[in-house]
């Protein structure tokens, strides 16, 4: 019981730090890296990816990542967007509950996911949790967290890795490509975020 209370306190502190970060003056890439550090502390994962998205097609654009399946990314995306995979980014970007994990969506049988079986499993990745960064205008990116195969699933962590947790990042993700194109890394060129953050 005490451990659960401490975990909830840690997640509440994380939510407050993420809320402050979402309206801070740091550039989008720095903001995403700092947010990942906070999420790693609260949820526990080593590898991650945060691609931006085209809200019309829900295709990934540029992104930041720390994982070890770089050469497998094209095949991973091909399998994910095939329509036969679980917790796929483009599906999460459209559905009401925009957070999901492979473990939860495969009923604990990760091998049901072709993406996991062919690309992620060989590098030792276990569960993957994904949340869409979206607002009323669309989905602007995703946060993906990867746990090692020997680690417990991320299923229980998706309560703090929730759709509201990513809603505050949507305006910053949306502005990132345009800010870069205009040659500015200042957050003053980015829209204000009036959304609340992590639930």
Image (tube, rainbow, N blue to C red):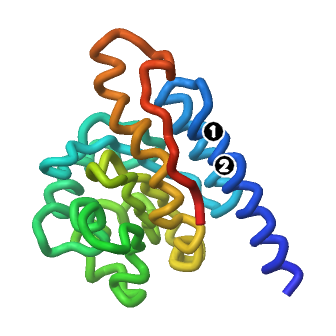
Quick check: 76 left or right of 136? left
Closer to us: mark 1 or mark 2?
A: 1
Quick check: 55 left or right of 34? left
Locate the C terminus and report the quarter of the image it occupies. bottom right
The disc label shown at residue 38, or none: 2
Secondary element type, mark 2: helix
Residue at the farthest right position: 2
Q: From where the camera sits, is residue 118 visible? A: no
Query: How far from the left and from the top, in percent, is residue 71?
Result: 27, 43
The disc label shown at residue 21, or none: 1
Query: How far from the left and from the top, in percent, is residue 96?
Result: 32, 73
* Label pair 1/2, CB-CB below 8 angstroms: yes
Residue lying at 14% horizontally and 75% vertically, measured from the top left? 84
Residue lying at 21% horizontally and 43% vertically, measured from the top left? 54
Secondary element type, mark 1: helix
The vertical placement of 4 against 57, above or below, is: below
């Amino acid at each position: 019981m005490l451990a659960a209370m401490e975990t909830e306190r840690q997640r509440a502190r994380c939510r407050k730090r993420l809320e402050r970060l979402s309206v801070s003056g740091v550039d989008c890439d720095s903001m995403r890296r700092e947010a990942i550090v906070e999420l790693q502390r609260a949820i526990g994962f080593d590898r991650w990816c945060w691609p931006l998205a085209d809200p019309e097609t829900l295709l990934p654009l540029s992104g930041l990542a720390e994982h070890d399946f770089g050469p497998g990314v094209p095949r991973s995306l091909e399998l994910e967007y095939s329509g036969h995979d679980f917790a796929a980014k483009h599906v999460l970007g459209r559905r009401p509950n925009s957070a999901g994990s492979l473990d939860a969506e495969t009923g604990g049988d990760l091998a049901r996911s072709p993406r996991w079986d062919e690309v992620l499993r060989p590098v030792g990745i276990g569960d993957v949790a994904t949340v869409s960064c979206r607002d009323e205008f669309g989905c602007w990116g995703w946060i993906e967290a990867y746990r090692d195969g020997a680690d417990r699933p991320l299923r229980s962590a998706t309560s703090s890795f929730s759709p509201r947790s990513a809603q505050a990042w949507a305006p910053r993700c949306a502005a990132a490509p345009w800010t870069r194109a205009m040659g500015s890394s200042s957050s003053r060129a980015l829209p204000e975020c009036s959304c609340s953050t992590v639930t």
